[in-house]
């Protein structure tokens, strides 16, 4: 596991914040560790386990002969029978077809991922590293079993996990994301399982769907989709009904900043469509506003405006650390952070880090 330790305004910050790293360090410093966690109810059943038990009335050999449009029709009809493949099997079949001409994210590469690679550099396989028990997430998903997948669809100048951008390194250092995951990771003490704690899950969608289909039937941890809002609508449709919590990053509020700082074209229209799609699908939604130094006005104003049209939770991440491309050379100022907090209040957004909002998260 690759770690980074920063000292920021007198505070020690560890990335990724894994219990097995944080605990000994705190012990050495003579400090006790308190993990904030607001747990889901004990009777919770993750959506993907339900999707394994909903049958769509189509046998596997029939599904293989159907066109992509016909598969989508079955998927979108939401009518279930007592025979045929499961809803999750159907999603896998659709995803396999989407890899023929990949437009899963805003790059719209249209590449055949069985033969070539698009901007994310990924073919059909994904490789992971199990970080362990993430203890620095929002209390409602904390602690999370953090899976870092190699390869991302965007290349943000401020990426904390830039060491996971190289797909080639993943092939050498990672483990293949497959059925053995469930023997390899120790998620028992965690509240949730987070895909992808080091980047976006979108380019890994087929591997994620397959690995969920191979999970033990008794696995009842909520699944967290930790993504970047550059997904296209097919991804939201396929993740609908298998994702319990969407944890979605938003850091840009205009196309110029997104293109300059992360190489994303048409950022705002993709992000607005993503937010609209998110509003229509099941699962709980937390939008993480990653505050970039100097971007409270050019990006932040538009971000809060976009969010004010939806009923999502918001989580402000203001502890920006310039440790990838070093374009900012500074952190957010106290003034920028307080302006961002004011914007959240002014636009009436629900801050998930306020106890009164966090307490309602799992029961509403
Ligand atoms: S996931 Fe995005 S970047 Fe990767 S091939 Fe598909 S469209 Fe291109
Ligand atoms: Zn900006």
Image (cartoon, rainbow, N blue to C red):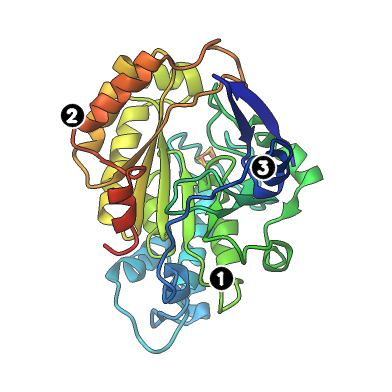
Mark 2 lies on residue: 346
**Secondary element type, mark 2:** helix
Residue 327: name its quadrant: top right
Pick the front one: 228 or 21 = 21
Q: Is mark 1 within 8 Å of ligand 1?
A: no
Residue 348 horizontal side relative to residue 144, left or right: left
Which residue is at 71% across, 35% downward? 3
| Residue 135 appears in view | yes
Picture coordinates of residue 305, whole percent (x, y): 22, 30
In the picture, the disc for residue 57 is none
Mark 2–mark 3 Cα distance, whole angstroms, equals 36 Å
In the picture, the disc for residue 22 is 3
Which residue is at 34% across, 35% downward? 271
> How many neighbours does mark 3 have within 10 angstroms: few (below 14), some (14-19), or many (20 or more)?
some
Residue 212: name its quadrant: bottom right
From this view, report whether residue 148 is shown above or below residue 182. above
Mark 2–mark 1 Cα distance, whole angstroms, equals 43 Å
Mark 3–mark 1 Cα distance, whole angstroms, equals 33 Å
From this view, report whether residue 261 is shown above or below residue 239. above
In the picture, the disc for residue 213 is 1
Of discs 2 and 1, which sits in the foreground?
Answer: 2
Total numbered badges shown on the rendered structure = 3
Of discs 3 and 1, which sits in the foreground?
Answer: 3
**Secondary element type, mark 1:** helix
Q: Earlier in the sequence, mark 2 or mark 1?
A: 1
Picture coordinates of residue 163, whole percent (x, y): 69, 32
Q: Earlier in the sequence, mark 3 or mark 1?
A: 3
Q: Residue furthest front?
A: 30
Q: Quarter of the image containing the N terminus?
A: top right
Picture coordinates of residue 59, whole percent (x, y): 47, 82
């Amino acid at each position: 596991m690759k770690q980074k330790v920063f000292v920021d305004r007198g505070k020690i910050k560890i990335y990724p914040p894994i219990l097995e790293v944080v605990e000994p360090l705190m012990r050495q410093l003579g400090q006790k560790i308190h993990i904030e966690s607001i747990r889901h109810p004990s009777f919770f059943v993750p959506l993907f386990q339900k999707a394994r038990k909903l049958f769509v009335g189509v046998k596997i050999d029939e599904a293989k002969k159907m066109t992509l449009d016909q598969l989508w029709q079955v998927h979108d009809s939401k009518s279930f029978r007592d025979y045929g493949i499961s809803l999750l099997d159907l999603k896998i079949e659709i995803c396999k077809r989407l890899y023929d001409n990949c437009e899963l994210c805003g790059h719209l590469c249209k590449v055949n991922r069985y033969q070539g690679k698009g901007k994310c550099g990924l073919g059909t396989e994904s490789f992971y590293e199990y970080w362990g028990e993430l203890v620095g997430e929002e209390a409602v998903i904390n602690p999370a079993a953090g899976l870092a997948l190699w390869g991302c669809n965007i290349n943000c100048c401020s990426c904390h996990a830039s060491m996971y951008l190289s797909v080639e390194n993943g092939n050498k250092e990672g483990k293949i994301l497959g059925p053995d995951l469930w023997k390899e990771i120790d998620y028992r003490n965690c509240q949730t399982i987070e895909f992808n704690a080091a980047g976006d899950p979108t380019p890994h969608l087929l591997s994620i769907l397959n690995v969920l289909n191979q999970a033990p039937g008794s696995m009842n941890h909520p699944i967290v989709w930790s993504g970047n809002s550059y997904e296209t609508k097919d991804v939201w449709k396929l993740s609908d009904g298998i994702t319990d919590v969407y944890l979605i990053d938003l850091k840009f509020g205009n196309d110029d900043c997104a293109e300059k700082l992360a190489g994303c074209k048409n950022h705002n229209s993709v992000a607005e469509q993503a937010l609209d799609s998110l509003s229509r699908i099941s699962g709980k939604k937390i939008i993480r506003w990653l505050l970039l130094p100097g971007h409270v006005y050019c990006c932040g104003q538009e971000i809060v405006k976009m969010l004010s049209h939806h009923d999502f939770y918001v989580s402000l991440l203001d502890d920006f650390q310039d440790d990838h491309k070093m374009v900012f050379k500074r952190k957010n100022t106290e003034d920028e952070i307080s302006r961002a907090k004011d914007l959240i209040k002014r636009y009436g957004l629900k801050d998930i880090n306020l106890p009164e909002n966090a307490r309602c998260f799992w029961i509403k």
